[in-house]
Image (cartoon, rainbow, N blue to C red):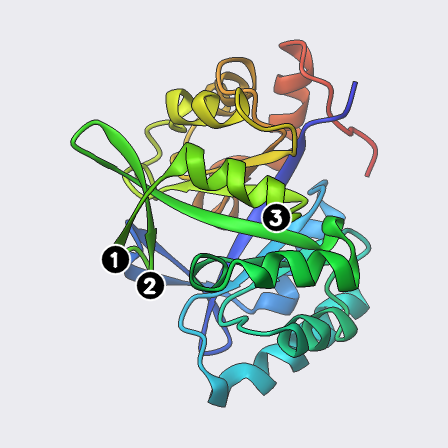
Amino acid sequence: MLKTRIIPCLDVNDGRVVKGINFLNLRDAGDPVECAKRYSESGADELVFLDITASSDRRETMVETIKKVSEVTFIPFTVGGGIKSISDIERILQAGSDKVSINTQAVLHPELITEGAKNFGSQCIVVAVDSKNVDGEDMVFIYGGRTNTGKRVVDWCRECEQLGAGEILLTSWDKDGTKSGFDNAALKRVTDQIKIPVIASGGGGKKEHFVSAVKEGNASALLAASVFHFGEIDIMDLKRYMADNGIPVRLDV
């Protein structure tokens, strides 16, 4: 059985790691390179870096950050934010990232998923899906959660798999930063319909939440930010708890 991955998420804004609630009221959480090194040494299975205010003038800064991170970490990491073209994907991967995460542009230009998978392998292409519940339906939002695409989350995740995505990063905006637990029902609706791995994001606050996201939502990996950044949950303690609850995890560091 595949081991469940624990993935700290580093939201990067102007070269610093930040964290808020529902993506607002951001707090500084440190230098991304230092954070990456610490997580690499403390049991994280992978890392995700999201340039949350990506723009062309900051792209070079992010590339330099990726290069520095790749020098100090020995675990796979994914980079997302502002990726609009095959050349953007290539630059991010060449800088040292193992995968790229595409969100808004995947919806606007689905061919980017297919071309990315064809050029670099589907294992490199992660589609980030931002979900909000609207009148009882999980809907896909883009542009940082501001625009409802009219697409149902389940339908879009199924389409992403068909287009060649290797993984889905499913974020519940209703849960983000609340520490009230992952949206297990929404997770299960997606994992029941697709075969590629789904990373659960949004709401992890207690160790029990991580266990239930696997047992009830069938998540392949669990992503969180503030509980790791601010020392509320130790990654190895979390993994031992998960192992005690029958979930296969990597315990060697």
At 44% from the left and 22% from the top, the residue drawn is 189
Q: CA distance from mark 2 to mark 1?
A: 6 Å
- For marks 1 and 3, give the one nearer the viewer: 3
Q: How many marks?
A: 3
Q: Identify which residue is drawn at 62% across, 10% down.
A: 245
Given residues 161 and 227, the one toward you in this image is 161
Q: CA distance from mark 1 to mark 3?
A: 22 Å
Q: Is residue 57 above or below residue 36?
A: below
Q: For the residue marked with disc 3, what is the amino acid?
A: Leu
Q: Residues within 10 Å of mark 2 (few under 14, many from 20)?
A: few
Residue 215 lies, with reference to residue 237, above or below; the image says: above
Mark 1 surroundings: few (<14), some (14-19) or many (≥20) residues within 10 A = few
Q: Position of residue 90 (x, y in %)?
A: 72, 73
Sequence-earlier tag: 1 or 3: 1
- Can residue 75 be spotted in the picture? yes
Q: State the SS at label 2.
A: loop
> Where is residue 177, by image quadrant?
top left
Q: Which mark is residue 143?
A: 2
Contact between marks 2 and 1 (CB within 8 A): the answer is yes
Dot 1: element: strand
Reading the image, the residue beneath label 3 is 163
Tags 3 and 2 touching, CB below 8 Å: no
Q: Quadrant of the C terminus?
A: top right
**Amino acid type of the residue that numbered disc 1 sits on in the rendered structure:** Thr
- Per the image, the residue denoted by label 1 is 147
Q: What element does badge 3 sit on?
A: helix
Q: Is residue 37 among the parts visible in the rendering? A: no
Q: Nearer the viewer, mark 3 or mark 2?
A: 3
Task: Give coordinates of residue 219: x percent, y percent.
Answer: 57, 26
- The quadrant of the picture occupied by the N terminus is top right
Q: Residue at x 32, y 37 (%)?
A: 175
